[in-house]
Amino acid sequence: MTLDGKVALVTGAGRNVGAAIALRLAREGAKVAVVDLDRERAGLTVKAIGEEVPGAAAAFVCDVSERAAVERLVTEVVERLGGIDILVNNVAVTDRGATVLDLAEEEWDRVLKVTLTSVFLVTKYAGRQMVAQGRGGAVVNIGSTSGYRARPNALAYPAAKAAVINVTRSMAAQLAPHGIRVNSVTPNKVGSPVGRDEEPPDRPRKGNMLGRGGRPDDIAAAVFFLASQDAGFITSTDLVVDGGVLNGVMD
């Protein structure tokens, strides 16, 4: 268990990729703060982890787009689990269907606040805790191939994810003197769509070099690597886990 003795905080851990990340980190020995706005979903993830690694996870309900809530969250995680060594900023929401001509300003603000501002806030306050502990740490932000490519059916989400990828680099430069590494993982179409529980039956499952759909465990494995000491000399890097979509061969 290479994360034995570490405490990990994972946002948006009540479903899909976030739940898979939380489970993988617990399997590797970490205590995991399962953070979600939905209490029931957070509890289900904790239950699933407990069936494999009893006592390894605890649920925390928090709106990570709000400063005061994030400050309380960090305090509660430290009190219950003993610190923070690993942070995974996974939570996101997306806009769908509207264009720049008709996307509501309120929807633009909501998507950026949840998907981007949460990364700033949670890293700020968890990062302060890591600095105070004096033992370094690892931050992994979840990007998206939408942050690299145009989306005809979304605007705020691609903007937010592009910013997540680049803010990761600045965070890495700023936190490196404290021994804190900051990286990102960029998936493409993994599990259920962002903000949905079930995958629609007509959703394409291929279109990449490897000929299969991405799985939440694929992303969890990449996050575990970047959080571990096997990646101890890696920071300010975006690890693309997309089956080759971004570099795909054009027909």
Image (cartoon, rainbow, N blue to C red):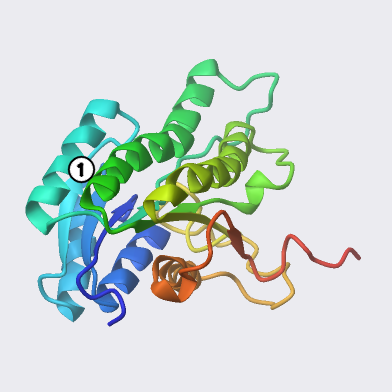
Vertical relation: 5 (above or below) 63: below
Residue 122: where, in percent of width, then height? 33, 40
Farthest-out residue, front: 177
Vertical relation: 248 (above or below) 40: below
Q: How many marks?
A: 1
Residue 41 appears in the figure: no
Residue 2: where, in percent of width, then height? 31, 79
Residue type of the residue flagged with mark 1: Val
Q: State which quadrant residue 208 falls in.
A: bottom right
Quadrant of image for the N terminus? bottom left
Q: Is residue 251 left or right of residue 89?
A: right
Nearest the viewer among 167 and 158 is 167
Vertical relation: 100 (above or below) 85: above
Instruction: Name the residue: 64% across, 45% down.
Output: 147
Q: Is residue 64 left or right of residue 79?
A: right
Residue hosting label 1 = 74
Instruction: Name the residue: 56% across, 69% down.
Output: 214
Farthest-out residue, bottom: 1
Q: For numbered disc 1, what is the local secondary structure?
A: helix
Residue 232: where, in percent of width, then height? 46, 69
Nearest the viewer among 217 and 29 is 29
Q: Is residue 128 left or right of residue 107?
A: left
Quadrant of image for the C terminus? bottom right
Specify few, some or many for label 1: CA neighbours under 10 Å numbering under 14, 14-19, or 20 or more.
many
